[in-house]
Image (cartoon, rainbow, N blue to C red):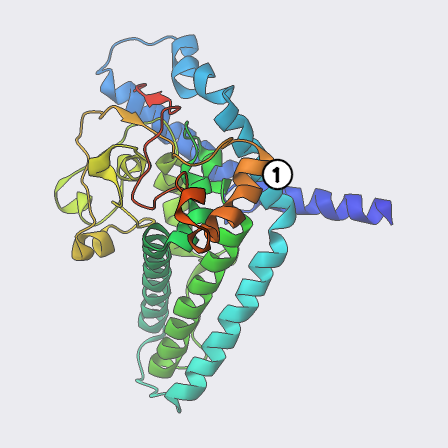
Amino acid sequence: MIHDVALSLRDHAAGALLSPSSFLSIWSLSAALLIAAGVALAKRRGRQVSLRAMARAMFPRNRLLCASARADVGFTLLSVFASAALFNWAVMSHFGVAKAARHAFGQPLELGLPQWVAVLAMTLALWFSYEFAYWFDHLLKHKIRVLWAFHKVHHSAEALSPLTIFRVHPVDNIIFYNIVAVVTGTASGAMHWLVGTGVSPWTVAGANILTIAGLMTIKHLHHSHAWIAWGGIWGRTILSPAHHQIHHSSAIEHHDRNFGGVLAVFDWLAGTLYIPNIRREALTFGVEGVGNPHGVRGSLIQPFADAISPLWPRTARDGASNPASHASKRGIRAAID
């Protein structure tokens, strides 16, 4: 029995590290490191940089060894070994919603599109629907106090690293998975009605190829100290790493900005887009209202109390976090290029 459990945990961990679609994939993490190093070298404009100096720039000790980083490791282990059931349940919900949507739309139109056009349309539609679901879920969690009580755990990180993406309360994950299931399931049903039930998107390891492209390029760098920014039309289309670092900022002018995952267009249309400067902006990360943001009580238990705090007398909830307030006195200044 114990042997079987150990083998299951080993296989699950191996899948998390080796699958291209995993957010802990060594392939995408390695790609992010190479991109960050390449950008750092380009900023030095040909000046010679020692290997030791580059290693210090890529792996700053004040971020790797701080309490926030240690908490991120704990959340990563929790996610890898405890969130599979949540994900599998959400996938089942996705297929259930898709089936219901196909039934609601009725007989497929069978437009007679060339196969590659139909597959391309399906790939784009499902990716756009996922990106919209991500943006909408994120917007709700910043605007609704009950949802913010759980989402603020992610914003309690005072130093960003690629592992910060796992710093998510389980309730936050459940809400996210099911919003994604409803939106992408509906989009899948609508697309099958348009192009036929036999059409599937292009995938890699079971994930949309466009999602993999984002993961292999910029997604890990969104939670990092590498300042990579762009403006112009690209700054209104694709969220650079700096866009998302702005989202985590405690500065008032950065509150409730850049809710998207990879696409910036939904923030652009909704007026929530903030395009960062090409040169690094000094940022501080963290939130108020969490007694110990890096401990089990503050990050896993307190959110339940904060979620029901509106039912308490006002004097009992004066210290509760406001969805509009991300300020922190404990934040670590982001000042490394």
Neighbor class of circle 1 (other Cα within 10 Å; few <14, some 14-19, many 20+) is few
Q: Which secondary structure lies at badge 1? A: helix
Q: Nearer the viewer, residue 12 or 257?
A: 257
Task: Name the spot of residue 242 as percent of width and height, x first.
Answer: 27, 34
On screen, residue 54 above or below 155: above
Residue at image point 15% right, 39% down? 231
User: Does any portion of residue 73 appear in the rendered image?
Assistant: yes
Task: Name the spot of residue 72 as percent of width and height, x first.
Answer: 52, 33
The amino acid type found where label 1 is placed reads: Leu
Q: Nearer the viewer, residue 229 or 158?
A: 158
On screen, residue 281 above or below 83: above
Name the side, left or right, on which 230 lies relative to 121: left
Residue 18 occupies which quadrant of the picture? top right
Residue at image point 62% right, 46% down? 15
Residue at image point 53% right, 36% down? 298
User: Does any portion of residue 207 appear in the rendered image?
Assistant: no
Name the side, left or right, on which 33 lies relative to 84: left
On screen, residue 73 above or below 185: above
Task: Name the spot of residue 132 as percent of width and height, x first.
Answer: 32, 60
Q: Return the residue at label 1.
A: 77
Task: Name the spot of residue 214 as percent of width and height, x first.
Answer: 37, 47
Quarter holding the C terminus? top left
Residue at image point 41% right, 30% down? 160
